[in-house]
Image: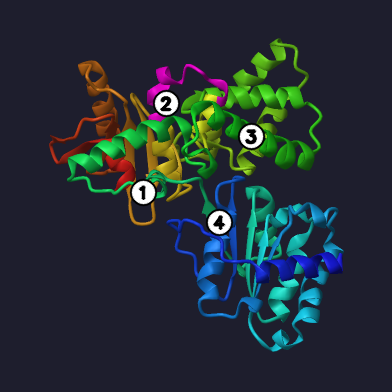
């Protein structure tokens, strides 16, 4: 294994810089902490590492940078005891570097059991700036919370936001330009259905669906079935299909349990909750509770389900054009989720899609693809006004396809705006 590490280290040091798109993340290059990047597979964590490496190479000798991808087949099977060989191999190749700061990049580290023990020891004893990535929220967060508490800063990485998608496509964002707006609206119609995974951009619908299907297979079988030793694969598959077909929909897991049981699946009530939590841990799904002052009350009510990427819906749902409202809502969720984990739906007499607590403010957002119908428009407005009074907020947002107006009711303002504009502000 030592010789394998020497080859990997040498090959990377001798490699040319990788051409990558800079993402909208402000990640420190020299901090006193371990930098952890977590997110769904293929969301661009490795590209962000390469972007950081390219920047560091401008001011640091390339020999001071180590990059290891733990999903490299040449490292299989890798165990905790092997990790010591990384730096041993490196210092054998470059003995003078023991006295210098070294940048260590470890990609998909969750592939090694108990990796955090090794990271903690080298962080505490050597002159290293450490960057790690992983595809499991639970594994990384639980390990960070125990062994690495206080030693790390964590960033969640998502597939391309709409702003990044436009940048990747080379589309200028100028909301005052009719020409720019036509390109932006056209791009949104594709992004809405195909999502923001880099490898799907520019591919036709059939190829894009195949790529996303392969991603999901990899996530489900490598990150969930293998990791948690799941035997009831058919149940996981049908649950997967149900959730991605029903994004932006209220789901009662108790009802789902009864439904699956009536179809002949052998399962306990806990199985549904467990499998959904595994999908959440792998960053494929998110569940949003109702806003209540009591956690018990939150748990008693149905949750809304959202996907990490709009493209996952089309894997199962060929009639995707009929669900534009759900696709709109999922994009608004992702826009908010990139900023905060504190997201709820609100319901008293009326329902409001999102109540989110950001760092400096609270926001209320309703999403309605079309508001041509007066009843629909009034329902969305009434829901927002009710929630604004409940939370004592003066501003609410209603996201639509193309309407842009400000509705003033007393001292309250509702900003009605097109989705493309909301995603770019």
Residue 88 occupies quadrant = bottom right
| Crowd class of label 1 (few under 14; some 14 to 19; many from 20; radius 10 Å) | few
Q: Is residue 58 left or right of residue 387?
A: right
Which residue is disc 4 drawn over?
Answer: 47
Question: Residue 407: which disc?
Answer: none
Q: Are marks 2 and 4 in contact (CB under 8 Å)?
A: no
Question: Residue 326: which disc?
Answer: 2
Query: What main secondary structure does the magenta stretch of the protein show?
Result: helix
Q: Is residue 24 left or right of residue 12?
A: left
CA gap, disc 4 and disc 1: 18 Å
Q: Are marks 2 and 3 in contact (CB under 8 Å)?
A: no
Q: Is residue 87 left or right of residue 335?
A: right
Tell me which segment is drawn in magenta.
315-328
Q: Is residue 31 above or below residue 391?
A: below
Q: Nearest to the eye among marks 2 and 1: give it.
A: 1
Q: Nearer the viewer, residue 195 or 294?
A: 195
First in residue order: circle 2 vs circle 3: 3
Which residue is disc 3 drawn over?
Answer: 216
First in residue order: circle 4 vs circle 3: 4
Residue at 56% from the left image edge and 68% from the top image edge: 53
First in residue order: circle 4 vs circle 1: 4
Residue 323 in magenta? yes
Residue 140: give x, y in percent of width and height.
66, 55
């Amino acid at each position: 294994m030592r010789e394998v590490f020497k080859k990997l280290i040498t090959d990377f040091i001798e490699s040319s810089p990788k051409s990558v798109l800079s993402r909208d993340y402000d990640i420190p290059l020299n901090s006193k902490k371990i930098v952890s990047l977590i997110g769904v597979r293929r969301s661009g964590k490795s590209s962000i590492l390469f972007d950081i490496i390219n920047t560091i190479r401008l001011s640091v000798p390339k020999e001071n940078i180590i990059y290891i991808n733990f999903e490299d087949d040449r490292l299989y099977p890798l165990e905790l005891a092997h990790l010591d060989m990384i730096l041993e191999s490196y210092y054998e190749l470059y003995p003078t570097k023991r006295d210098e700061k070294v940048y260590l990049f470890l990609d998909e580290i969750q592939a090694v059991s108990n990796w955090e023990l090794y990271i903690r020891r080298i962080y505490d004893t050597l002159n290293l700036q450490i960057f790690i990535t992983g595809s499991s929220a639970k594994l990384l967060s639980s390990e960070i919370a125990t062994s690495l508490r206080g030693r790390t800063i964590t960033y969640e990485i998502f597939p391309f936001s709409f702003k990044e998608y436009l940048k990747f496509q080379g589309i200028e964002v100028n909301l005052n330009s009719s020409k720019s707006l036509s390109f932006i609206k056209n791009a949104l119609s594709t992004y809405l259905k195909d999502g923001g995974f880099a490898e799907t951009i520019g591919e036709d619908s059939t190829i894009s669906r195949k790529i996303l299907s392969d991603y999901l297979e990899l996530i489900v079988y490598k990150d969930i079935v293998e990791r948690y030793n799941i035997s009831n694969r058919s149940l996981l598959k049908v649950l997967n299909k149900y959730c991605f077909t029903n994004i932006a929909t209220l789901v009662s897991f108790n009802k789902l349990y009864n439904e699956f049981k009536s179809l002949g699946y052998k399962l306990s009530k806990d199985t549904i909750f467990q499998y959904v939590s595994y999908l959440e841990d792998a960053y494929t799904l998110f569940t949003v509770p109702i806003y209540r002052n009591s956690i018990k009350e939150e748990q008693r009510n149905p949750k809304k389900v959202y996907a990490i990427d709009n493209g996952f819906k089309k894997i199962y749902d060929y009639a995707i054009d009929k669900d534009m409202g759900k696709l709109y809502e999922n994009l608004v969720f992702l826009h908010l989720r990139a900023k905060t984990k504190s997201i709820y739906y609100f319901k008293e007499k009326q329902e409001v899609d999102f109540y989110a607590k950001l760092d400096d403010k609270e926001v209320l957002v309703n999403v309605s693809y079309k508001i041509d119908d007066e009843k629909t428009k009034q329902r969305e407005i009434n829901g927002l006004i009710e929630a604004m009074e409940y939370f004592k907020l003066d501003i609410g947002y209603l996201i639509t396809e193309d309407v842009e107006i400000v509705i003033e009711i007393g001292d309250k303002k509702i900003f009605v705006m097109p989705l493309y504009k909301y995603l770019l502000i």
